[in-house]
Amino acid sequence: MSSRTYAEAGVDTAAGDRAVELMKSAVRATHGPEVLGGVGGFAGLFDASALLGYRRPLLASSTDGVGTKVAIAQAIDKHDTIGHDLVGMVVDDIVVVGAKPLFMTDYIACGKVFPERIADIVRGIAEACELTGTALVGGETAEHPGLLGVDDYDVAGAATGIVEADRILGSERVQDGDVVLALASSGLHSNGYSLVRHILAKAGIGYGDRAADLGSTWGEALLTPTRLYTTPLLGIAEQFDGAVHSLSHVTGGGIAANLARVLPQGSWAEVDRSTWSPAPVFRVLSDLAGTTLESSEGTWNLGIGFLAVVDAASATAIAGALTAGGIDTWQVGTVRLEAVAARPAGDFEQGAKGVDGGAVRLVGAYADGAN
């Protein structure tokens, strides 16, 4: 009876080792003196001595993936941007509470390890970690033949950050008259891709087809990396001490639902659509689907990647500082803590994701043209 090897079962451990060698330098670039042991250990080590300087340090954690956006990367064989999306989805959730990211780990499941492909994915993760000040301290690549197709893979990650207890941002800091600032997205980011793929499939459009209105192929346009907000937002929170009250990462659920999560109960806000024009990718997709932009407000970010609720006296200066730093920022509304009876009639989103927060609705019509 012949022996059976792991390779015959479809798992190539040598390819996994090769992938690690290809990604080592990119991962090391995220390591400061706090990271011990280098790449390849069973566990990542992070020196927490600096935390002793905190009065009451609180750890913040987040985990997420990229969703079906990976299907487009696989379809056009371009894998160097998915890592930015992963870090954006994970690390930018941590900054919502005002926490500084410390370290991150990643997990890649695939049908077959192609070392160069895995290295491209991890290099993207490492680049984004470096941009957000996050150490990439470990990860895992798992080969799952028979469960995933040869060219299939999925990515996920988890990160940990730290914030001083009396510096936490959140709904309890929000005051009547606070201004809601919108920070521009770079495009679809990493949400709503099941709808995107459905629209293109129904229209008979391939990812390699030219999208004239977008100036690229559909695949290239749809793989625009998620914008990273952690570093500029932490900088603003420090520069304008106490003026930033709460933050919202606009991901699944859209603008209204995610803003409602970071407002206090009994508060309400109206987001004025006329203050911005959604990017062409949103308009083209809506036209292809034969729907309105408004109908996708619970699915896509429509041009707003983050929302900041800030003190009214500092709003203009904060918006100017973020815009000067490369992220277009503008006022979209004002928060009211008045009685519910004073709230305008109409349908509001009331909290979301299990959080009984404030009430938010979008009003008006979107501005014409591109931002």
Image (spheres, rainbow, N blue to C red):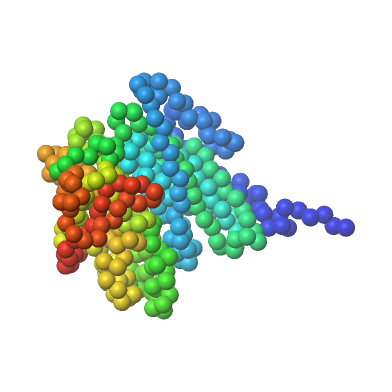
Residue drawn at point x = 34 percent, y = 64 percent: 221
- Residue farthest toward the right in the current orientation of the protein: 1
Residue drawn at point x = 60 percent, y = 36 percent: 42
Given residues 97 and 88, the one toward you in this image is 97
Given residues 88 and 294, the one toward you in this image is 294
In the rendered image, residue 312, in percent from the top left (x then y), is placed at 13, 41
Can residue 196 be seen from the camera position used here? yes
In the rendered image, residue 301, in percent from the top left (x then y), is placed at 30, 58
The mark tally for this picture is 0
Quick one: quadrant of the N terminus?
Answer: bottom right
In the rendered image, residue 43, in percent from the top left (x then y), is placed at 56, 35
Given residues 285 and 29, the one toward you in this image is 285
Quick one: quadrant of the C terminus?
Answer: bottom left
Can residue 80 be seen from the camera position used here? no
Residue 137, placed above or below residue 180: above
Q: Quadrant of residue 246?
A: top left
Residue drawn at point x = 71 percent, y = 55 percent: 7
In the rendered image, residue 233, in percent from the top left (x then y), is placed at 27, 41
Given residues 50 and 270, the one toward you in this image is 270
Residue 54 as seen in the image, left or right of residue 122: left
Residue drawn at point x = 45 percent, y = 49 percent: 64
